[in-house]
Image (cartoon, grey):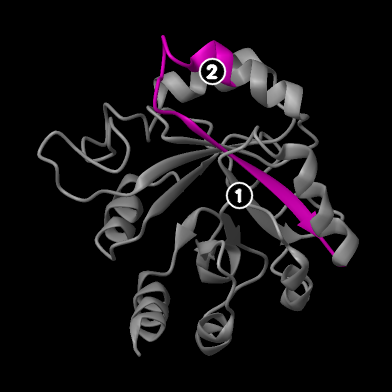
Amino acid sequence: MRDPENIHAVKELGIDFLGLIFWPKSSRYVKDITVRAGNIPDIPTELGMTKSQERQPATVGVFVNEMPQTVVTHAYNYKLDYIQLHGEESPTYIDNLKRTLIPDIMPEIKVIKALSIREADDVKRWRQYKDHTDLILFDTKCDCVGGSGKQFDWSVLEGYDGDIPFLLSGGIGPKDAERVKRFSHPMCIGIDINSRFEIAPAMKDISKLRTFINEIQQQ
């Protein structure tokens, strides 16, 4: 996201994470400084909280094979809570990034590693990130880098036996509420939605989001 008014409207829906994409090739690329924390006072400076301790979504910065110093600079300037790595970043890359930021610059920063999934063997890649990443995001494998709007076969995640919590991603749309509610895995902590809830790149359809969230929350 990058439009301040749209960000505020989405936050009012009670979401848990809010994403800013820092990959220059993305149509959702945050190029301008319009969403710096200084221009949006409600973006939290601490994990999930403002100074008033009101519940606020965590801010996630998405990067693809980016230079570590650029990631560090954006993490600091945008007061990120999470760094999401959506390329071929290695465990060593993650470790070096954490050592740079923790504890002196951003002691509470966490890392999400995205893994592209098409078949059961793809899920096994989580093992190389054990003890390195804080969260995993399982997304659909495609020719692009995320945002394809396509889903993978969620049943392959039955083979995930890791101890790293994960987010379910990949083409989840407004009509998938019941399917999401039926999906169950002890390490799944939430879902990632994006392109199929957009009016235009980086602009969310508030009405569709509100309806979807209400349906998800219904017993």
Instruction: Identify the residue under disc 1.
Output: 164
Q: Nearer the viewer, residue 52 or 30?
A: 52
Give the residue type that dot 2 points to.
Val
Q: Is residue 193 visible?
A: yes
Quadrant (top left/top right/bottom left/bottom right) for the C terminus: bottom left
Q: Is residue 146 magenta?
A: no
Q: Is residue 120 left or right of residue 90?
A: right
Q: How many marks?
A: 2
Q: Is residue 116 magenta?
A: yes
N-terminal label among 1 and 2: 2
Where residue 105 appears, x then y in whole percent? Answer: 42, 12
Where residue 51 appears, x then y in whole percent? Answer: 14, 33
Badge 1 marks a residue whose secondary structure is: loop
Give the residue type that dot 1 points to.
Ile
Where residue 68 appears, x then y in whole percent? Answer: 65, 17
Displayed quadrant of residue 24 = top right
Q: Is residue 147 visible?
A: no
Q: Which mark is residue 72?
A: 2
Displayed quadrant of residue 170 = bottom right
Rate crowding at label 2 as few (under 14), some (14 to 19) or many (20 or more) other CA atoms within 10 Å.
some
Of badges 1 and 2, the one in the foreground is: 1
Residue at position x 65%, y 32% from top? Answer: 132
Q: Nearer the viewer, residue 69 or 128?
A: 128
Image: magenta residue range = 98-119
Q: Nearer the viewer, residue 159 or 49?
A: 159
Q: Which mark is residue 149?
A: none
Q: Is residue 105 left or right of residue 21?
A: left
Q: Is residue 43 left or right of residue 16?
A: left
Residue at position x 43%, y 14% from top? Answer: 103
Q: Is residue 212 left or right of residue 55?
A: right
